[in-house]
Image (cartoon, helix red, strand yellow):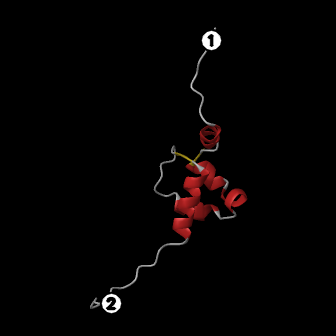
Amino acid sequence: MNDKRARKPPAVVQDELSKRTKQEWIESAEPVFKKERFEMAGALFDRKDTDLLSEQEVKKKLDTYLNPVKEEANVDSTE
């Protein structure tokens, strides 16, 4: 029998294996990212509990949450 299955590239397989739920990322905030659980919860507040998130997604959301872009006032504004 010749079973031909489509093999995924190793990077794709690894990424799928490293995905975790929102709660798992919150619980692993300190050992993985050296952040407090409340910081991780704040960064992931808009995600469902059942969403599977990769480490890259979580890093990006955490960075955005902890380092928000400051809005500059318009020079022509009357405020």
Q: Identify the residue at image location x=61%, y=55%.
A: 26
| Residue 10, quarter of picture | top right
Label 1: how many residues lie within 10 Å, few (<14), some (14-19) or many (20+)? few
| Residue 13, quarter of picture | top right
Q: In this view, does 50 lie above or below 74?
A: above
Amino acid found under the numbered disc labelled 2: Val
The quadrant of the rendering that contains the N terminus is top right
The x, y position of residue 3, in whole percent, is 61, 15
The quadrant of the rendering that contains the C terminus is bottom left
Amino acid found under the numbered disc labelled 1: Asn
Residue highlighted by disc 1: 2
Total label count? 2
Q: Nearer the viewer, mark 2 or mark 1?
A: 1
Q: Identify the residue at image location x=59%, y=40%.
A: 12
Q: Is mark 1 on a helix, strand or loop?
A: loop
Q: Identify the residue at image location x=63%, y=61%.
A: 37
Give the mark nearer the N terminus: 2 vs 1. Answer: 1
| Residue 41, quarter of picture | bottom right
Q: In this view, does 47 lie above or below 3?
A: below
Relative placement, left or right, of 72 versus 1 is left
For the residues labelled 2 and 1, say whether their Cβ atoms are less than 8 Å apart. Answer: no
Residue highlighted by disc 2: 75
Q: Is residue 50 above or below residue 1?
A: below
Query: Which of 4 and 51 lies nearest the eye of the viewer?
Result: 4
Specify the farthest residue to the top. Answer: 1
